[in-house]
Image (cartoon, rainbow, N blue to C red):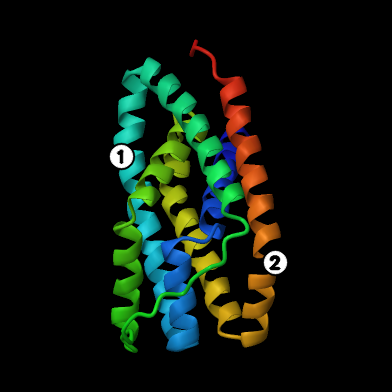
Amino acid sequence: MEVTLSLASVLGALLIGAISPGPSFVLVARTAMAISRIDALFVAVGMGLGGVFFSVAALLGLQALLVHVPWLYLTLKFAGGLYLVYLALRIWRGARQPITLPDTPQLSTTARKSLLLGLVTQLSNPKTAIVYGSIFAALLPQHLPPAATLALPLLVFLVETGWYSIVALALSSAALQNAYLRSKHHVDRVAGGVMALLGLKLLAATRPLS
């Protein structure tokens, strides 16, 4: 049960991070509106593959290290809580800022290039690497069962690809696009509030490992 709750917390935190508009959101939105729904869906798959890369890297690096250095686990967990609170403040403060879709050159209309574009965009975003490292260190148990370790990258792929696929499908419709833009303020405030509560909970629960 503890492992299941930890995985659910990780996926929930990653989903909240993905929902808050950033470079990945702008790329998927731009592709959906300027090119085609299919291209935007392949960009979404690229985002999911990028999430798999970050999750595997975080698991391989952090899990092995934290087992042998318990104090580092405590430190990173505390730092993860601070980062989530910081991210929540950023989301909250930016709630009223409009989303600006940049004027970019025509993107490729081939599925392969759209997928690679999404993957490269995800991998080139340093904030994504920080988010994965912080969330994994903060929310995963120190000893993660092998089955959960293997399942986590797949679940991350489903969360990342699933969310950006929803964005691709929704923003390829003018009516839904306008509805989202009108509700951005409320969506960001809710996301920021949830992220802040999660970070404060981590900070309050931080204690030396037994």
Vertical order, 116 against 160 (above or below): below
Q: Secondary structure at mark 2?
A: helix
Residue at mark 1? 60
Which circle, 2 or 1, is nearer the viewer? Answer: 2
Residue drawn at x 52%, y 52% is 17
Who is closer to the viewer here, 135 or 6?
135
Q: Is residue 5 above or below residue 40?
A: above
Tell me the SS state at disc 1: helix
Q: Give the image location of residue 32, x and y in percent.
A: 48, 82
The tally of labels here is 2
Observer able to see residue 161: yes
Q: Which mark is residue 46?
A: none
Q: Which label number is shown at residue 183?
A: 2
Number of other residues with Cα within 10 Å of mark 2, as a class: few under 14, some 14 to 19, many 20 or more = few
- The three-letter amino acid code for the residue at tag 2 is Ser
Say which amino acid is labelled 1: Leu
| Residue 158 placement, left or right of 4 | left
Q: Residue at x 51, y 57 (%)?
A: 18
* First of labels 2, 1 by sequence position: 1
Left or right: residue 188 versus residue 31 is: right
Instruction: State whether residue 141 is above or below residue 26.
Output: above
Report x, y in % for residue 22.
46, 60
Q: Is residue 203 above or below residue 47?
A: above
Tell me: 53 left or right of 204.
left
Q: Could you tell me if residue 142 is visible in this image? A: no
- The residue that appears at 29% across and 36% down in the rendered structure is 61
CB within 8 Å, label 2 to label 1: no
In the picture, the quarter occupied by the N terminus is top right
Q: Compute the Cα span from label 2 to label 1.
A: 39 Å
Residue under the image location 41 percent in, 27 percent down? 76
Query: Counting other residues with Cα less than 10 Å from the Cα at mark 1, is it few (<14), some (14-19), or many (20 or more)?
Result: few
Residue 97: % across, % down: 57, 61
